Structure formats: C-alpha cells, structure tokens
Amino acid sequence: MGVKLGDLISRKSISFEFLAGKTVAIDAFNALYQFLAIIRTGPGVPLKDKHGRITSHLNGLLFRTVRLMEYGIKPVYVFDGKPPELKKATIEERKERKEEALREYQEAILRGDFETAWSKAVQTATLSESMANDAKTLLDFMGVPWIQAPSEGEAQAAYMTIKGDIWASASQDYDSLLFGAERLVRNLTISGRRFYRKKKVSVKLNPELVVLEEALSELGLKREQLVDLAILIGTDYNEGIKGIGPKTAYKLIRKYGSLENIIKYENVSLDFDYEAVRSIFLNPEVTDDYDLRWGSVDERGIIKFLCEDRDFNVERVRKAVERLRKASVAFRQTTLF
C-alpha cells in the first residue's frame, strides 16, 4: 500500500536510456505482485503449469528483467524478510480484502459477469513462500543478483543507496524515501503503461525519479519530519489521524516541526506507539551480508526450470535467453571498461 505522499512529492519524468549503466534495487515483492495481478487470461485466471502451479510471476520476472538489461539497466532484486510486528494489522487487513475479492470474483463467474470477475480477480493476488523461492531460482539461473532482506525490502534497498552500492531504489511506494533512499525510481515497467483494473483501461506513463535531498529541500523538511508527516497520514504500521490528509499533515509539520509539538499544541491524541513507528523508518533492520556480483547465464537451467518443469514455450524462452545473454555481455563489457 505505502504512504500516500504523491500529492506532496514532485517527480521528474526520465527515460529508460537515462538509467543505462545504473544499478537499481527493485522491490521484488512489489514487482512480483504486479505480475500476479495483471498477467492473467480469460476472466482473470493467472498463468499456470500442468500441475496447477501459478507461473505469472515467473513470466513477468523473466521478460521484464531481460528488457531492463537491454536498456543497460542493472537490476538487483530485494526480497522482504520478516515484517515488523506493527505491520500485523495491515497484513491482516490485506488478507481480508483479498478474501472478499475472491468471494466477489466467484459470484461474478457464476452469473457470467466476466468483466467484473476480471476486476476482482486481480485483487486476489497472493505471493506464497514457494513462489518467491521460484523467483529466486530463476534469477540465479539468469545470473541476476538478489538479496534477502532481514525485514522490509524497501529499507534494505534504501540502505544500499546510502552506502553507494546501488544508484537508486525502484518501487511504486514512497516508503523508500522514509527509509532514506537517496533516489527513488517509480514506474519501472517496460510496457510504458499503467493498467487501471476497475475501468479496464491503460494510460501511457514514463519512469519517474525522486531525489530525496531535492524533495526535502522543496518541502522545507528534514527526513525525520517527513517521517512524522507520514505517521499523521497513516503508514503500514499505524492508522492515520482521522481528518488529516497529506496537505493538512504538511501544514502541521511545517508549523510545529514534530509530532510531539503537534500533540502538545493541537490537542491531538495518538493511540499507538508513534516512536516505535518512527524507529522502523529511521532505524530499520538491514544487513551488510549481500553480494552484488553478476553470474553467468545458465541457459540449460532456465530451459529446464521454465519449459520442462513449468510448461513455458521453449522457443519463446530460448529467444529471451539469447536476448539476456547479449544484454549481459554488453553491460559486462561496459563495466570492465
């Protein structure tokens, strides 16, 4: 879900060519959920192999990664670990929404309303541990590095931008900025379009770049104040204050400087441990135990895993592998040079 900062944070449109030669850490769960939501057939049925195992996420992961690399972009995938305890309520709420969407999907199928069925189906996407492990296996065969975060993937990616190991964090959520990501890239989708499931229409879009230092300067805030602002709106770790949206929260932070002062002078009552929420963003659990080295492309491994084990089309996968090999060689040569 992420914090709703879109009305406050200015973004600049960039091209894929602009990102050539840059290493970008992609929020793996964020990307895989996108694939699971939109790569579907008929009335919203995800791609599956003959054993009934969902493969939409593997399809999207292969072809999007290949295309990014053809642009010279160096993708690194960061997987979520154990979520903070304070995220439990959000996770439960998401689960309930998916269960409700599943019921509505089944009802729509029974009455032959396939348009509604499709719109509900995309809301039921669930990423299991085995599906995440399959994604890691595919990345290993592709020679693409991935990192297992101890907790939130966005926090780990942000940490790596601070260290200078990667150029930017890539996610649709603005939480990356709260975790301290020096740069955030949004809309890193090769199709160049965003699909609105309820209307079943798509609109053209370009990648967007947010530079944290520039965003803070424009807002006249420190990062700690941006975190306090987000807490007022609501995060994955706390509900927002009723009646306070992004613009009101911004005005309050600009006027009083901190949550403590807002509580004191505006008589605002917070029924949760806001200091604990603040700490999740400012002192996240991260690790230095990662390896960003690229491996070689294992064509046989990819073919066996996707075609023999998951029923992918052999010719289509071979073409993707060839493109992957050329892209990998090209930016390896650039790096060496």
Image (cartoon, grey):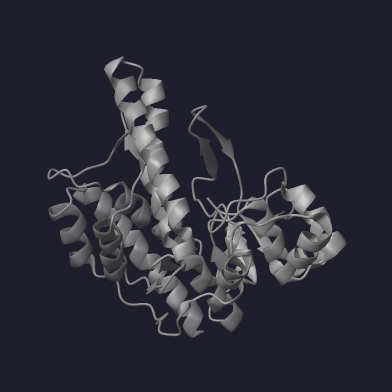
Is residue 238 placed above or below 334 in the rendered structure? Answer: above
Residue 98 is situated, as x and y percent measured from the top left of the image, at 38, 40
The residue lying at 47 percent from left, 67 percent from top is 152
The residue lying at 14 percent from left, 55 percent from top is 309
| Most distant residue in the top direction | 111
Residue 277 is situated, as x and y percent measured from the top left of the image, at 58, 66
Residue 288 is situated, as x and y percent measured from the top left of the image, at 45, 85
Q: Is residue 272 left or right of residue 72?
A: right
Q: Is residue 154 left or right of residue 6?
A: left
Q: Is residue 156 left or right of residue 326?
A: right
Query: From where the camera sits, is residue 43 visible?
Result: no
Q: Quadrant of residue 85?
A: bottom left
The residue closer to the viewer here, 326 or 182, is 182
Q: Is residue 69 left or right of residue 16?
A: left
The residue lying at 80 percent from left, 63 percent from top is 264
Q: Quadrant of residue 227?
A: bottom right
Is residue 17 placed above or below 33 in the rendered structure? Answer: below
| Most distant residue in the right direction | 255
Is residue 238 placed above or below 192 in the rendered structure? Answer: below
Query: From where the camera sits, is residue 282 visible?
Result: yes
Q: Quadrant of residue 229?
A: bottom right
